Image (cartoon, grey):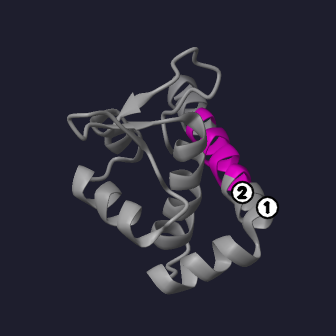
Amino acid sequence: MHQFDENSSKVYYNIGEVAKIFNVNTSLLRFWEKEFPQLKPFKNTKKTRYYTKEDIQLIENIYFLVKEKGYTIEGAKQKLTADKKIVERNSQICNSLQDIKHFLLQLKQQLD
């Protein structure tokens, strides 16, 4: 379950914040940036990366395919190119189900 508030008024997120959202190392985000040409965070003159909400949604889709579904990098690239809308929908469904599971587990704890 990823702790990303899509309704936040924040425009840019630094690489550390994004890594924390997905519980991954910043090096993995830099690697994915090299592997997935559609992932292009804004870089300032000091080369600091800043991710938009759209970048984070793309990372969400990559994470879903690679980490949760077990796709290879090449397979994930092909899937994102061919079925982007389906991948986005499935990723959102998976996150919603994880949120429901988390809520139900908390509810169960309170009832015990």
Relative to 27, is 66 above or below?
below
Residue 101 rendering spot, x and y as whole percentages:
62, 44
Q: How many marks?
A: 2
Residue 6's mark?
A: none
Amino acid carrying label 2: it is Glu
Location of residue 31 (image quadrant): bottom left
Residue 85's mark?
A: 1
Whether the residues at callouts 1 and 2 have beta carbons within 8 Å, the answer is yes
Taking the spot 56% from the left edge, 26% from the top edge, the residue there is 5
Q: SS class of the residue under badge 2?
A: helix
Relative to 75, is 18 above or below?
above
Query: Is-magenta flag for residue 35?
Result: no
Query: Is-magenta flag for residue 97?
Result: yes
Taking the spot 53% from the left edge, 45% from the top edge, the residue there is 55
Taking the spot 77% from the left edge, 56% from the top edge, the residue there is 89
Closest to the observer, 52 or 91:
52
What's the CA distance linking mark 1 and mark 2? 5 Å
Residue indicated by mark 2: 88
Question: Which range is magenta?
Answer: 92-103
Amino acid carrying label 1: it is Lys
Give the left or right position of residue 28, taking residue 81 as reference.
left
